[in-house]
Amino acid sequence: MKNTYFHTLMILIICCFLLIPSYSMSGSSKSKKKGGPPSHAKAHGYRAKHNYNYYPKANVYYDTSRKMYFYIEGDNWKASVSLPSTLKVQLGNHVSVEMETDKPYLKN
């Protein structure tokens, strides 16, 4: 009886070790890619480009894809889909600018 119990216990212990996944020294049996983006992300090093019309006379940026204006009001930059009438009069000519940021005023 004791011998059967001992053999059953040993078989259970061995089965448990066989069912547990093996671990490497780093703690995981799966190798991880390092240095690259996940498969669902854009290519490594890719930066989104944002196109703006910059009106230097009024210091206003217009994001052509989001259809938003960025302008100074007091000491702060504002973002809006329309400009105050005082700025509309001052716009003048624009220059097309491409940036890697969605906040063009940070480069100003």
Image: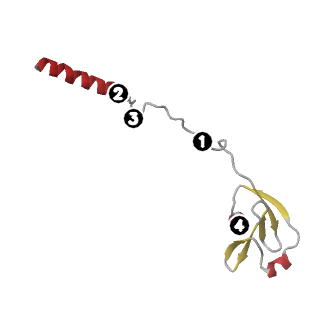
Point 67% across, 41% down: residue: 43
Please, what is the three-letter code of the amino acid marked with disc 1? Pro
Q: Please give the label number shown on residue 37.
A: 1
Q: Please give the label number shown on residue 27.
A: 3
At which x and y percent is residue 82? 77, 73
- Mark 2 surroundings: few (<14), some (14-19) or many (≥20) residues within 10 A: few
Task: Determine whether the residue tagged by mark 3 lies in a helix, strand or loop.
Answer: loop
Instruction: Please tell me whether residue 24 is drawn above or below residue 68 in the rendered image.
Output: above
Where the C terminus falls, by quadrant?
bottom right
- Give the image quarter of residue 80: bottom right
Q: Earlier in the sequence, mark 2 or mark 4?
A: 2
Q: Please give the label number shown on residue 105.
A: 4
At which x and y percent is residue 41? 63, 44
Please, what is the three-letter code of the amino acid marked with disc 4? Tyr
- Give the image quarter of residue 78: bottom right
Instruction: Say if mark 2 contacts mark 4, CB within 8 Å.
Output: no
Q: Earlier in the sequence, mark 4 or mark 3?
A: 3
- Cα separation between marks 3 and 2: 17 Å
